[in-house]
Amino acid sequence: MKLRFSFLLTLGLAVAGFAAQAQTKVAPRRAVAPKQKVVVREGVTLKDGVVMQEGKVLVTQQGHTTPLADATTLTNGTKIMADGTVTKPDGSTVTLQEGDMMSLSGRLTTKAMKAEQDSLMMMAKNGKGKAKVKRKN
């Protein structure tokens, strides 16, 4: 009888202990800083650059396009004149042709290069895969 009483007492205390633990409050949530938004570097957009269009040199910066009036120096030291003459940092000169584009970092993309890239993209879309393209040197 004493054994049964002690067993029931132990069982009752254990249940009371578990019940007491279940009634405790959950710790409040910690404040978490919101994730930062991805921001494009100010002053540079995807289409910023210098382009020769209809015989005029146009400069696009921050989405605004204006004709080039004075000589401009890019970040890598490339100088662009209002007539479309480009002097690279190594001293070589190139004249922009219709449709040629130069990024504000100084990378020149010619109209022929754009046409080649477009044709390669079309081949990839059509499923013709890796086709050999001959380049004119």
Image (cartoon, grey):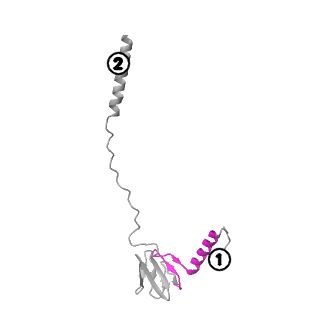
Which amino acid, mark 2? Leu
Q: Quadrant of residue 117?
A: bottom right
Name which residue lies at 35% across and 33% down.
Answer: 22
Quarter of the picture holding the C terminus: bottom right
Label 2: how many Cα within 10 Å (few below 14, some 14–19, many 20+)? few
Task: Classify residue 114 as left or right of residue 27.
Answer: right
Pointers 2 and 1 in contact (CB under 8 A)?
no
Label 1: how many Cα within 10 Å (few below 14, some 14–19, many 20+)? few
Q: Which residue is mark 1?
A: 135
Q: Quadrant of residue 128?
A: bottom right
76 over 34 or under it: above or below: below
Which amino acid, mark 1? Arg
Task: Classify residue 56 as left or right of residue 119.
Answer: left
Q: Spot the residue most to the top.
A: 1
The mark that comes first in sequence, 2 or 1, is 2
Q: Is residue 105 magenta?
A: yes
Q: Secondary structure at mark 1?
A: loop
33 over 23 or under it: above or below: below
Label of residue 41 in the image:
none
- List x then y, in percent, for residue 11: 37, 21
- State which region is magenta: 96-125
Q: Nearer the viewer, mark 2 or mark 1?
A: 2
- List x then y, in percent, for residue 46: 46, 72
1 over 115 or under it: above or below: above
- List x then y, in percent, for residue 51: 48, 82
Q: Quadrant of residue 62?
A: bottom left
Q: Which residue is mark 2?
A: 9
Q: Is residue 57 magenta?
A: no
Name which residue lies at 36% across and 11% down.
Answer: 2
